[in-house]
Amino acid sequence: MASTPSSLQRLHLIAIGGSIMHNLALALHKRGAHVTGSDDEIFEPAKSRLAAAGLLPVQEGWFPEKVSTDLDAVIVGMHARPDNPELLKAQELGLRVYSFPEFIYEASKNKQRVVIGGSHGKTSITSLILHVLRYHGRKFDYAVGAQLEGFDLMVQLTEDAPIIIIEGDEYLSSPIDRRPKFHLYQHHIGVISGISWDHINVFPTEEIYREQFKTFADMTPKAGTLIYDRDDEQVQLVTVPSSPDVKYIGYGPHEHVIRQGKTFLLNKKDEEVPVQVFGEHNLRNISAAKEVCKCLGIKGKDFYEALGSFKGAARRLELVREGQESVVYKDFAHAPSKLKATATAFKKQYPQRKLVACLELHTFSSLNPAFLPQYAHTFDAPDVAVVYFNPHVLEHKRLPPLPPEAVQQAFQRPNLQVFTDSRQLAEFLRNQNWQNANLLMMTSGTFDGLDLVQLATDITK
């Protein structure tokens, strides 16, 4: 029987510099645990945040001597390899080794666990729920994959919060645990926001990928609740009501109207509720969050009251700059379904304006020739569609060279512009006519350090 994390006071984190791992380190430190860690590379903002808390390793690298029987447990991040020297030492000493999701489960065994799963929308749904709960002064813990406005950390673990809201990633748990993260949290309330094949390097076929969500759905316990997008064909295949003891709740896009680039929700009395997010995918996210909040005892009118001040999750359809005749947004998007949803939403929100949209192919899946055909017709909404990728990233990921013609062919858009140099891309964008035109930049990377704020300033002058 594993110890409960409240009794685990001496913890060592392998790959402490990771986005979620450094947040876990800070959350545990805040709770009073003695935390150490290692990593072979630590970038900002993790570096400064760990340093400020006195948790930054003295030097980068792996040091087996840091791992000893004095430790209560070791937590290993996904960035580490199975042959990591510190991990091998921990195993040799017979120490308890947790993956991130295993540890979160152990820390929340006595709480009601809400897990938000899905290929897209899970960060937005999770952050919506957190915003509403905090607005109404509810006590809760959380683990979310993005930095949220008004929250210091991406992880919070306390002794007294009765519930925990977890963003349930379907990616693998650790280098030595090949199970998807969201299988380990053992949810009481589960959400599946949509299924669109991703992570081709781990789930080689659409069927294998979908099966992970079926397992998640089937794990919903007696008296548990499964909330799902009723219009998603892939979701329909895995959320067939199969247990009489589970409550199944399907949702669609929230009723709304759009006026002059602003979206208003319609509540039961047909009153208009202004919101700061837009697009059908976000209207679905709002519906999912509303159903979860209802399960947690938040009434409809209280949900809408809190919603007015929700600005969206960081890097999810985020306004960079607004001018008289143009706006520039950025979005954390790379998967085909996200690309299509965001580009279509943007065009609908500003139907009278030309839309220039640019996507950076950055992930293993998006740069893989076997996966590229999934992008067919997902980029039809913009008036000018641009794709950028850096050939060096292909080399780094050990993928074959990608001819621009192959990208055009995969997207099935003959006038698609393809760039492999970020300076040429910036020049092309600056030379567009920006009268009555908007720019949308989509990536899970940085367009190789392109200064988006400066570009947006030039465009919206």
Image (spheres, helix red, strand yellow):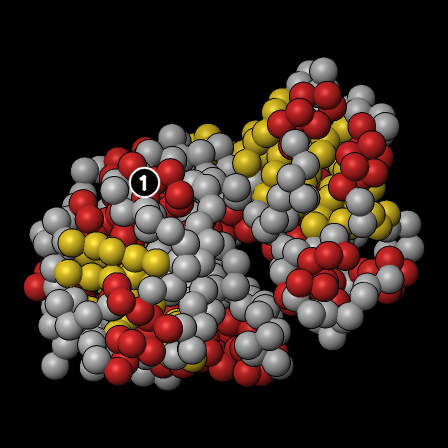
**Which residue is drawn at the image coordinates 59% and 43% (left, top)?**
331
Q: Position of residue 361 (x, y in %)?
A: 70, 55
Where does the C terminus fall, quadrant-wise?
Answer: top right
Q: Examine the rendered structure and indicate whether residue 198 appears above or below residue 382.
A: below
Where does the N terminus fall, quadrant-wise?
Answer: bottom left
Q: Position of residue 282 (x, y in %)?
A: 51, 47
**Amino acid under label 1?**
Ala
Horizontal side of residue 5 vs 460, given as left or right: left
Q: Please tell me in which quadrant of the rendered image residue 296 appears.
A: bottom left
**Which residue is drawn at the image coordinates 68% and 36% (left, top)?**
450
The one nearer the camera, 229 or 142, is 142
**Which residue is drawn at the image coordinates 62% and 27% (left, top)?**
453
**Which residue is drawn at the image coordinates 80% and 28% (left, top)?**
430
Q: Please tell me in which quadrant of the rendered image residue 61 appears.
A: bottom left
Q: Regarding mark 1 in the picture, which secondary structure is present there?
A: helix
The one nearer the camera, 347 or 327, is 327
Horizontal side of residue 56 vs 119, given as left or right: left
